[in-house]
Each structure stands twice: as structure tokens, then as C-alpha cells.
Amino acid sequence: MRDDGGAGSGLPRPRADLAGAVEAGPRPSAPWPGMKDQVLVFAGVALSAVYALAGKDDKLRLLDLAERSGRTASAPSGYGPPESYALSGRSPAADAVRAGRSMWWDAAELDTYRETENGSETPTLPSGVSLGVLPLATDGTRLGCLLVVGDTAEGFAPEQRSFLELYAEEVAAGLETAAEPIAPGPVGQGTSGRPGGQAPGGEGRQSGVPGRGDSEGADTSTTDAGGPAPRDGPAGGPVTRRPLLGPALDRLGVGSFTLAPASGLIDADARVLELVGVAPDAFDGRVETLLAQTVPEDLPALMSVVEPRQAVGGRELDFRIRCANGELRWLRLSCRVPAGGDRGPGRVPEQVLGVVADASLLRPVADEVSRVQRLAASLANALSVRDVSRVVAIALREPLGADRVALAGLEAADRLVVTVLDPPEPSAWPEIWRSEWRSEWPDAPLQALPTLQAALREGRPSLWHAGTELEPGLAGVGPGGLAVLPLLAQGRIAGVCLVGWDEPHEFVPEERSLLTATAGLVGQALMRAQTYDAEQELATTLQRSLLPRRLPELPGCVAVARYLPARRGLQVGGDWYDVISLSDRHVALVIGDVQGHSAAAATIMGQIRTAIRAYAVEGHPPDVVVSHANRLLVGMETDLFATCCYVDLDIEEGNAWFVRAGHLPPLLRNPDGTTEEMAIEGGLPLGVVEDAEYPMTAAGLTPGTLLVMATDGLVESSSLPLDEGLRRLQQVLASTDPSDAGHVADDLLGDRSRREDDVALLLMRYDGLKVRPIRVGWTVWRLPDAVMHARRFTARTMRSWNLAEEADVVLLVVSELVTNALVHTHGAVRLDLTLAADRLRVAVSDSSPRAPAKPVIVDWEATGGRGLLLVEAMSAGWGSVPVSGGKQVWSEIVVPPHEPPGTETGTGPAAEPVGLLPSRGP
């Protein structure tokens, strides 16, 4: 018996004669439709059967059977595999399952197997056929086996074995899902007489699936003993007898065709048309229609199949087609003359059967030229370093039978930045690589790998056989053989590729040529990808620096934002958003879009965003903020304009004021789930007319309302009108759960892979304040004892709010802020106290616009300058904001959380008329 190190095949024989066969019964008949016949012609399979393990009785039971119509005459119709095999017995199926590898027999090896099994030749399979058994397993769990009978004496060719291994993987996946009960009655003895109860003309149709006898709707099929016999599945549970072989072929996605060389007519299935890129309704049955999609350079090879004088069977070739998006796709075509066809020299057969699949699917044994061509086509579509690395790992490791592939870029002439390790597990690599495993892309110092460093200096591929003395960091990569490929591009080394084998490996001349050609291609692609990544990193850094790093935490509402760059070109644009905390429980929400998609647009965006923030913090109303920004953009003398939507929200009352400058209107989701597009008056975009007017629109928000502001990249594209995009956005908004604002934002973004423009999204959920703040105010008269009166007013207020324990800190802050205002400014001074939840806010307003400044140097002899340092030390936060031509210096002090008195009316009992002198005494 020949063992190729893969999975092995076993031998089915007439049921009464096969050693190890336990049960016999009438042979099922299960012809497949013609298109599947064509696929199995390529695989050389005349008959296939699936056996599943029965966990309790140690048997392999026949679960599905399929015969190819039009088989060779040497496989008579009376032949069929037995109903079951004993797993502990001597049989091809049991041998392969126990060994856990595929096993293959040609006709001569079958004779040897019979002699060793029975001691003498017995009538089993007809002569001139081959066999294979492929174990079925998932995640290390044995499920059964796939048994195939070949129609030639030579056995299965390498490409046929590769295809059957893929086929077995799909069958195993289907078998794993078979979790319903079955009975061990003869396969196909349902209502149709086909495996799994297939009805004629209805492939894969279930009918009368046998069950345990008491299952609802179970078939009444019985064993030879007359009673129902339940059967356990591969994991100890029951499985259902169902069609497995046909659906497995469907999942492989292999297309098939029948060609009449004399007429040039071709009968191709839907999968072939899909692979070639021809719409079914546009296919006229002529082979020229399919050839028109082929790259001209590959036409001569295809013509050797379709030309009447040259058509021969048994051809396998790769060719390329041009997809609708301009990309190239490699396809694999295999064709054969069906059994009984005229195979004589110079004779044109009546029919040629063939299959077409994606070239990467069948894992063909291709020559080095085809591999290099396929690698070049894949690298042409790889943009980033990560993409290039993945393509190289796929192109080298499996086709070369390698155990490890590593790709690394060279930085600073002494550092390898590893971009891919295949396999990715750290335990598969030497310690020098694991010690640098700090992130997804680890680094490796060249100084620790002197042999590799010397190979890179030489700049040509180095091939080291098993036994070569290397440092541990390299010897562990390929103890059986190691290929080091310096990746040259534009006269310098861009990186290195390592290919290693565990078992002793001989480098044949064809493989050496392949590795050399691969190094040149990958070097150029890696250099291009490094440039692309650098550009994208620059664009990303620029964009992130111009947008807020994080949004502020707001009382009574939650704001989230999303930004997505465009998928094409430079990933930087003019979309922006901002959330600005204002004084007196106000917040400003801003979203905008600068015309164009370039670094210039991003620069203008950064300037406009900064200007709007500055105008808003100064205390201007929304219409003034937008007007000032418009004049600023007009004065920049740029050809770009910008759209903008600005909202000023009073968090305490829920009142909002909207200003729209050529931008999309906001969307509202009301607490009852209804959505609406807000009717906001609009003005011209920013930067068009210097004296443009921007009217304000007022609206009230109730707790539970979602406010959504977005740029047009989210709702408009070349294939999506703006009105339709807004309608879809409202539908998504209405169907989301508003409790998680982040999830709502993600749902609104939808499919992120198809955007043509950059997208900015700003969403706020208004919840309202659970505890309304209370405020009191005091006008400080410029008297010699004004600070004392301010302290007394503050002390009475603290007692009325039950905050006597925090009075010392608050009085110290009040003294310092009031003193600074009286000493350094002129005009009226006002003290305001606000209590909200766990914060007490002390605010002192004056008429001077000059902000206070902390002293740079404070020594022991200084008589002043320590006041602001004390305020900073005592406060959870402090600052200064412009207010009505002057300023307001504020400080927030943490107090125990409680519900302050007077929350229903918003005033405390200590509130006194503004401007009146307090009574004497604290």
C-alpha cells in the first residue's frame, strides 16, 4: 500500500465479499444530475460514499452514497459499498480512520491489499479501478470517512487528490451539523430510493428521514430484524441521514461545463458564468462569449481546448479574466473527454467535460512561472504592508510545504520590524522573536542575528540546508532548511523574507528560481506599501490632531462622535465636529464640512473649528459665533467654502438655539420613538458672502431625546440621493435602542466599507438634570469691608444648604476671588453661588476682560500673588471665561452629594435681594 503522508483511501467492494463488512442490503441507486457529473469527471470519481461513526456500537455506517452517471464500463452497476464497517476490523475504511490520514490505492495496489487481507484472491472490485479513503474530522474529533472509487487503473493524480481533500473538508462540515436521529436501514430506502430520500429531479430534497421510532414525523424504515434501530452520531449523539455529497460540491463553488468542440457551443452552469463575469441573461451559449472576458495573453492556451482540430482531454491550465472593477482574477480550468469518447489521435471528440474554479481554491501543483504570475497579480492589489505580508505568506508557505514564513521590513539599517509571522503563535518561533513580542508587529535586532545581517549585506538569496550551523534565532526558524530572501527595491534592501522547514528539505533548481523571482516582486511591493502606509499615517495624524481627542463629560446629557475617513485617496478631509462646554450649564454642539477632500481642506477645517470654539467661549450667541466664523473664512482669501450647523443647548431647561450655514438639518428621535427632520432656518455656507445673515431657530428638548448631526458623506453618494439617504437614516434611528448612545452611532454608520467621502457624526442624548441646581447671587459694593460682607453672605447660604462642614474652604475661595476683583478691576463686582449635585460653583464677575494670571515666581518676601495658588489648591477645577465685555472667574468645590433644599423652586432660603447689604453678623 502506498502512503503519501496525507490522508489515505480505503477500498469498497461488493457487499458480500468485503472483509470487515458487517451488514449487507440491496444496493442503492443514486445518480446525480449532469453538472455534478462533470465536476466528478475532473476528480476521477465514479462512486463516492460517506461513512459516519456510530459511537456506541463501534461501526462506520453508510450515510450517503452517490454514483456518477456514465461511468466506465469496468465499474458495473451492480457494485456498491456495504452498509457498515467494523471500526476494529480489517477494511480500507477502518484502516484509514484509525490511521487518521488519507490512503490511496491504484489497481495494482488493490490486488496486493486483497492478497494480504484474505490470503488469496477473491472476487471483489472489478479490475482497472482505483480507490481512496479520506478520514472526516473537525477540531480533532473523528466523524467518519469519505470513500471514493476511481475510474482508472492509474490512481488519483495529485491535483485530483488536492480537490478530493477539499471535498472531504466540506463533507466533514456537513456531517458535523447532522445532529438528528437516523436508523441504519439501507441507504436510499426512503420515499425516493435515493440517498437521504432525494426525489427525482429534486437534489438534496429531504423526505421521510428515518428516526428513532418515537420521533415526531419519523419514517417507519426498519432493520432486517424488523424493529427500529437508532444510531448514534460521531460525538455520541444521533445524526440524520441526509444528502452530504451534493451539498458539499455546491459549497466548494466549482463551476462545470460541457463543450461541443465541433460547434463551439458550451453548456455552462451559473458558477462558471459568475467566475468569468458574464450575466446569465447575457450568455448566448457560445464559447466566444466566455473567451471575450479572458486576458488576451492567455487566449492561445484556452484555444488549445476549444479549437476543433486541437481539442484533447486531460488538460489543466490557469488563465486570467478581467473583472468589472478592472482587477485580474486567476482561474483554473480542468477538462477531460468523458468515458467512451473518441480519444484517438487527431480525432475531435464530440464532448469535452470541464470544471472551472478560483485558482486559489484547488491548490494546484503549478510550475514556478504560474506561481510568480499569480503572486504578481495578488501583489498588484495589496496596498498596505500588512496586505503584502499576508499575500506573501499565502503564496509561499503552503505551495512550498514550508513550516514557517516571516516577513520583516528593515528600519534604520539595524532593526527588523516584523510584519507577519505564519504561523502566528509565539511558541512556533525561537526565543529571539518571542522576547520581542510586545505588540502585533514585534521587532528583532539585527545585532542578535549576525548570519542574517551578513546575508542582507550580500543582497542575494541564501539557502541553508539541514545541519548548517546557525545562531539559535535562525536555526529554530528552519532546522530542516532555511531560505533567506533579501527584498531589494530601488537599489536598497526594503526588508527580508524567511522561509523555513522542519524536515530536511532539498532546494531543487525550479524552487531556487521561484524564490529569487519572488524576492524581486515582494521587494518592489513592500517598498510601495511602506510609502503608502507612511502617507496614510501622516494623513491620520493630521486628521486626529485637528479633531477633539475626547468629548467632555456633560451633566444631564451624553455626547458621542464618530469620524471615518474616505476609502479612496488621501484619508484626510474637511469634516469636523466639536462639543464645547460653556458657562452656566450651556453646551455648544458643532458639526461642519469644508469643501474638498485634501490637506488644504483639512487645514481650513482646523482653523474654522478653532475660531468657532474661541467665539463660543467668549460668550457670543450662536448667530454671532457663526457670523464671525463666516467673516474669518472670507478673509482667508481661499477658494474653499464650508458648511456648518451650530447648536447652543441650555442643559438645565432643555432649550436649544440652532444656526445652520448651508449644512444638513439635524434629526431628532423623540422619546416615543418617532423621528423627524428639524425645520431649521438656513443661511449661506461659510466663506461665500461676508455679510451673510444667519438666523436662529429655537426648539425645546424633552428628556430622552436624541439629537443627530451628520455630514453629507453619511447620507449621500453617487448611487444614493440625499433625500433617500436621510430617509434611511431616520429609519435606522427609529429602530435603535437609545439607551446606548455609542451603539446608536455605530448603527447609523452602517456599512463602513462602501463610503466614498469622509463622514462625521455627532450624536447627543438629552436626559435632563435629575437634580435642578439652585443659585443665589450677591452684588458686591466697593466698601472697605466688602469682602467681609461677601463672606457673611456665603456663610449664611452654606448653613441654609446644610454645608457648614465645607464652609471654611468655600469662604477662603470667596475671599481670594472677591479681593482680586476689587483690587485689580474697576466697576461692579458680582458673586454667584450655584449648588448642583456634588459640586458647589463660586463665580465672581467683573468688568475687566483681562484674565487673571498666576505668578511665575513667589518668594518669601512677596506680599501678593498667592491668592490664585490657594484657589487652585482648594478647587476641583477653576478658570476664567469672558462674559459681556468682562470676565468671570470661577471655582468648583466638591461637596457631599445630596439633594439641596429648594430644588423644586430652584431657589434657596438664603437667597437675598441682589444689591442689598446683609445684616450684621454672620
Image (tube, rainbow, N blue to C red):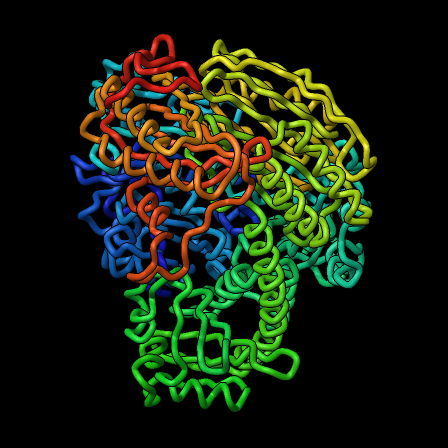
* As drawn, 156 above or below 648: below
Q: State the residue at coordinates (55%, 11%).
A: 674
* As drawn, 443 above or below 881: below
Q: Nearer the viewer, residue 637 or 557?
A: 637
**Percent from the top left, x then y, of residue 225?**
20, 22
Q: Quadrant of the N terminus?
A: bottom left
**Percent from the top left, x then y, of residue 229?**
22, 24
Q: Nearer the viewer, residue 237 or 447?
A: 447
- Please identify the quarter of the rendering in which residue 553 is found: top left
Looking at the image, residue 136 sits to the left or right of residue 400; the answer is left
- Please identify the quarter of the rendering in which residue 614 is found: top right
Looking at the image, residue 104 sits to the left or right of residue 673; the answer is left
**Percent from the top left, x then y, of residue 480?**
35, 79
Q: Looking at the image, can residue 195 be seen?
A: no
Q: Nearer the viewer, residue 529 or 853?
A: 853
Q: State the residue at coordinates (51%, 32%).
A: 582
**Percent from the top left, x then y, of residue 168?**
41, 47
Q: Looking at the image, can residue 454 be seen?
A: yes
Q: State the residue at coordinates (54%, 16%).
A: 655
Q: State the residue at coordinates (33%, 43%).
A: 871
How many dots with numbers? 0
Q: Quadrant of the C terminus?
A: top left
